[in-house]
Every structure is written in C-alpha cells, then in structure tokens.
Amino acid sequence: MIYLDNAATSYPKPENVYNAMIDHMKNAGANPGRSGHRLSLEAGRAILKTRELIGTLFNIDNPMQIIFTSNATDSLNLAIKGVLKKGDHVITSTMEHNSVLRPITALEKIGVENTIIQCNAEGVIDPEDIKRAIRSNTKLIALTHGSNVTGTLMPIEAVGRIAKEAGVLFLVDAAQTAGIYEIDVNKLNIDLLGVPGHKGLMGPQGTGILYIREGLDVLHFKEGGTGSKSEELTQPEMLPDRYESGTANTPGIVGLGAGIEFILKEGIEKIRNHEKELTQYFIEALAQIEQVKVYGPKDSEKQGAVISINIGEEDSSEIAFVLDQAFNIAVRSGLHCAPLAHKTIGSFEQGTVRFSIGYFNTKEDIDRAVEAIKEICKEI
Amino acid sequence: MIYLDNAATSYPKPENVYNAMIDHMKNAGANPGRSGHRLSLEAGRAILKTRELIGTLFNIDNPMQIIFTSNATDSLNLAIKGVLKKGDHVITSTMEHNSVLRPITALEKIGVENTIIQCNAEGVIDPEDIKRAIRSNTKLIALTHGSNVTGTLMPIEAVGRIAKEAGVLFLVDAAQTAGIYEIDVNKLNIDLLGVPGHKGLMGPQGTGILYIREGLDVLHFKEGGTGSKSEELTQPEMLPDRYESGTANTPGIVGLGAGIEFILKEGIEKIRNHEKELTQYFIEALAQIEQVKVYGPKDSEKQGAVISINIGEEDSSEIAFVLDQAFNIAVRSGLHCAPLAHKTIGSFEQGTVRFSIGYFNTKEDIDRAVEAIKEICKEI
C-alpha cells in the first residue's frame, strides 16, 4: 500500500510514537493531575512534557497557554466561539475547511457577521483584500496556513501584521502545516493557533491543540472535574484547567509528545525539504500528462505537500477507487470538507483526487503514483 | 504497586486492548469515514464495530444513536446543554460529580433553574424527593448511577419510571457503573446515558460515549468536517455525524471496542460479583479497625466498588501519600471533584481516602491495603 493521504492523517507514525503510547499505557496508565500517587504523578509529568515540547515547536513562552483538545476541529470551534460575540465581525477565506466555515456559519444565528474573502483560482489570497474587509466591529481573522485541497500556502506573516495593526485577533488553522513549516506564534502575531495532533505532528488520532495567547479572554464551553478547586461549583479560571475538564487523553498526548520529539530530532527543515522535493517532483511529472489537470499553485515554494488533480471529466471518486483497487494507492477524493475551496478552484461538481505526501513517502512512491495515473489515462 | 484507583481510570487494561490499539495504529491507521481507500474503510469498520458492541452492552437498538466523545465530562456537557434552554428546570442530586454540577451551575447564567436534591449521609437519594421536585418546567433529571465518592448506587430504575410518567428526560451518569452493572437504556427509561470509555469499559483514556434516545432533539456545539454533506456550510442533521466533527480518536475507539469485547467475554455478572466480593471483604475488614471511619452504605449490595474512608482527623492527602510512599498502594484523596457529596457525607474539610477496586484486583491486594491501614493507625 502506497499511502498518499497524509493530509487526512499521517501514516505510518514514527516507531517511537507507538512505543511511547504502549509503554505509557502499560506502565503508567493512571489519571494525571488527580490522585497523588506515583503513577498519577508520572501521567501528569508526561502531559506536561508534551505541553513543553509543543511550546518549543511553536515558540510559546508559557506552556499553560496550550490546551489539549480532541482534534483541530475541536480547537477551532473553541477559538471561534470563544472570542466571537453578537455584533462581532469575522473575516475568513474561501479556502477554509468546514471546521472553520461551519462554526462561523453557525454563529450567524446569534448575530455574528462574517466576510469570506474570495481567493483566486490557485487558492491564493491577497492580504490587501483582508485589510480592506476590516470594519470597526471586526474581532477576528481566521485563516488557514495551508489549504487542505490545493496545498496553497497563505501569507500568514503579512496577515498577522495586518491583524496586529488593526487590533484584530488572528486565528491560524495549521492543520496542514504544523510540524512541517516554521510557526512562531510571537513572530507571526498569532493569537490563536489550532493544530491537529495526528497530521504533521505525527501523534495519534484523538489529539488536538489550541494555543491561546496569554491574557486573551476565551469563553469555555465545557465544565467539569479539573482536579483543581474541586470545592467550587464553577469552572476554575486558570489555564489550562479552564478548558480541560475530565480525564485527559493521556496515551494520545504521550504519543503526540513522541511525535514532536521525532520532529525536533529530525529537524523541521529536513522534513519540509523532503516533502517539498517530492511535491515538486510529482508536480513536474504530472505536467507531462495531457489529461491531468493539476489545481493550485503547482509550485512547491507556494504550496505544501498536497496535490489535487482531476483526469479529464472523470469523477474523482471513481479515480480514487481505481487507484486503491488496482494500484494499491491510498488517496482521497471528493470535496475534502472544503466546499468553497472547490468553488474557488472550479472543481465543486467533480471534486478532486487529492494526493498528500508525508515524511515517510519516497520518490518511488511518487513514481508509482505517476505510473498509475498514466495507466488510468490510457484506459479512459 | 497495588492499584486501587480504578474509579479514576481502570488499570491495567486487558491485554487485548493494548494489542488492538497498536495493531490498528500500525496496520490500519487511516482516517475513518473520509477517504474511500481500504485503510480508511477498515478504520470506519473498526469504529462501527465498537458502536455495535456498545449497542449490545446497553441494549441500544440503533448504534447510530451512540456518539463518541473525548470523556464522560464531554458527554455530560453535551447532554445537559443540548437539552436545557432558558426557562427550563433540571433536577439533580448532591452526590453528583462536578461534570454534572458545574455545567448545571453554568446554565444558571442563561436562566436554567435547578434543584439539587439532598441525599442522606450515606449518599442515598429518596426517589420521592425527586418526584416532589418536578415542576411544570422540569425538562431533565440528571442522576449518577453510582457515586464516585461513596459508591452509593442510585435507584435509577425508580427514577426512570418517575421521569417517564412525568414526561421529563432522564440523563444517567454511568461513570462508575458502566461495564460492571447491567444498564438497559430501554428497560430503565434512560433518554441520555453518559459513559467514560476508560473506566469500567476498560478502554483507553480519551474515549467517552453519549447515548441519545432516538428522536430526541439535542443541540450540537461543534461544527466541522464530518465527511458527509461536505458541500454544505451547515452541520448535517444525521447522527452520529451531527455530533462527531473532525477526525475520530480511532485508536482509542478501537481500544474501547476491545475492552467491551473483554467484558462481554468475561460476562458482566462475573465482573460485578468479583468486585462485590472484594468490596464486602474490604468493608468488613475496615469495620474491625477502630480509628477508621467508612463512608457510604458499607454494604456491597448498595454500593459499587468504591470505598471512602478517613483515619481519625488525619488529612486524607497525608494518608494517601503514606499509602503510596510507604506501602506502594495507589489511592485517591481529597474531594474527588464532588464537593456537595462531601458536604452530604460530612467530609468536606477532610476529604476522603478513596479505595476503588477493579476487576484485576485480588483478595491479596485488599489484605495488603488493610494491613497498611492498620500500620498507619498504629503510627498515629
């Protein structure tokens, strides 16, 4: 099986991720932050360790500002609904995932206004369009760092500057870029950063992160046991407890920590360069196949390791099915939960066949994918 | 290490839980319900399998009414906030965990009224008190099945009847009983059932379940990618998608399925009888130690495998610390995130030392605990 669905979840994980999870579950599987016995303390330390590793990766000064969630969708919902109130205005883009678009749409009911900036056919946004959309009641700019459909990299540095100058909060959805691209929350003026644990960070599914800039007031939507201030019937104010009620996904968080350790050890630049090289190689090979339409920038400098294509007018699901059944190649087809992105790039009806490359893919994998696509083109 | 903190999380897990998780992660670690390739389909099947196993365990006719959450707190928040609106009234008890009390308290701000029924000093509730508290605007009764402080079993069958007769919804918090006690949602008239995956169900941390009775309208609080109706910017109405946005905790859910398979194989009665036997044995031994005060019913027919004690006027944390450090026995001390329960049983200042027994504990473990308590009593 050639796995080219890393934008959905990275696979496989580094060996140390599996090992750390099993080791933790077997030898320290207690509840963190509750009881005082040694297993519980060990679980608590393991969680703190992951929090600190995340802090290192994103240059977050205070690891207590890092909230563990169950996935990036969970993070983005908390961020969006936690800061937007009736009468506020939010700016986002047509390249966003439904994990951003659906919460923003849901908030229309309570009187939160939104502007969805139109990106061009390659998924590229003009920061000046964002600047022009800012109103007196604009509270938040929510932008993906890299499209999950075309890989298009967004100018988050420029947008961060615009947000800061305008006194508007800046939320970045780093679902496709965390662990592969440098993200320094201070340098990029990021107030809120939503990240899945199971994609570029190489942790297991069931993990997500929300970074909240210190001093920022974000509502909480879940209350419960936090192991702190147990005598009170109201949620504690201190972070991360305020947003982390109930038993933590300790094995998942331990696995996430192991994933980040792997990344820090390999070096983020090495990971990025490997993925860039394969992306460029793939794009150039695809350019040689007449029936293939490649979406997005078609330039590994301007996109992450996500390449969406179509073959003629063929249904994208059909192509993905053949790639799986006949060639043992795993990709994703359809709309990828980002409908406006497809309207933007012109593939709303057809969807796209999405190849997403991970650190463990090889040049041979790309060769096999190219060969398969050529075979399919011949058959059509 | 003698682990007697199973009310926090069961430990160890059955061997097949570890194996199923690792095997799934290594061999089928893709995203369920998104892509169409074989790994993704296998992940989807694995999740469906767990859903069906849960259906079998709780006699839930339609497994699609089972929602995966990140823990019981997550489930309880969704249930409570999903059905209660301004002007509604909810009835609960003083024996509840903060995962019930805190969300209910938070709802006071939006005009949801509550009545917290006083239980007696053993944590026992009188169903008639609940009946008397029902008003014309009562929408929900939220009750624990078994106290996490005293183990006290609540008369959920009687309360279920009262709720049904009054046309009031019935939410059961089965955090301490699922997997050990028979819970038939139909027979018990349960409309909403909140369950952690990592306690009696023997799955990993990071998993929880909410059962929602078919036809019941529960609000959703998270929107995002569901892999369904991706063309729409609004959340799909169909279950479980409506409540399950973003990537599922597939390894966790697979582990949970393995835990339930273990339970179904052993038989729930065998598990309960083992825990009951050890509980009764422990209670009787504790009754012989003069300085020890045991809370709760002190009768394994009336309580789960949770035994809270204090030794004289000693601080509960101090005793737990000594049990860990000098005797290698893991218990939990303090308020156990249930402050009103301690006010009810008279231990609010001192907290309690909580021993919670699991299926893998032995008579020898209890002997060791009793010996340790005797030693500590001698020293004081």
Image: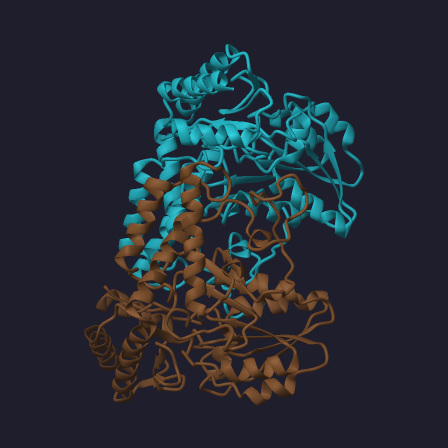
Chain colours: A brown, B cyan
Instruction: Please provide percent x and percent y for residue B138.
Output: 75, 39
- Establish if B292 lies above or below A325: above
Instruction: Please provide percent x and percent y for residue B6.
Output: 45, 32
Residue B88 visible to an observer of this rendering: yes
Q: How many marks?
A: 0
- Establish if B23 lies above or below A203: above
A57 left or right, relative to A286: right
Image quadrant in which you'd find residue A336: bottom left
Considering the image in quadrants, where does the C terminus of chain A appear? bottom left
- A278 and B67: which one is in front? A278
Image quadrant in which you'd find residue B80: top right
Instruction: Please provide percent x and percent y for residue A132.
Output: 64, 88
The residue at the point 48 percent across, 63 percent down is A72
Q: Residue furthest front?
A: B379
- Establish if A366 lies above or below B125: below
Instruction: Please provide percent x and percent y for residue A12.
Output: 28, 61
Considering the image in quadrants, where does the N terminus of chain A appear? bottom left
The residue at the point 64 percent across, 84 percent down is A133
Residue B182 visible to an observer of this rendering: no
Q: Residue furthest top?
A: B288
A60 left or right, relative to B271: right
Image quadrant in which you'd find residue B190: top right
- Establish if A44 lies above or below A140: above
The residue at the point 77 percent across, 31 percent down is B133
- A334 and A209: which one is in front? A209
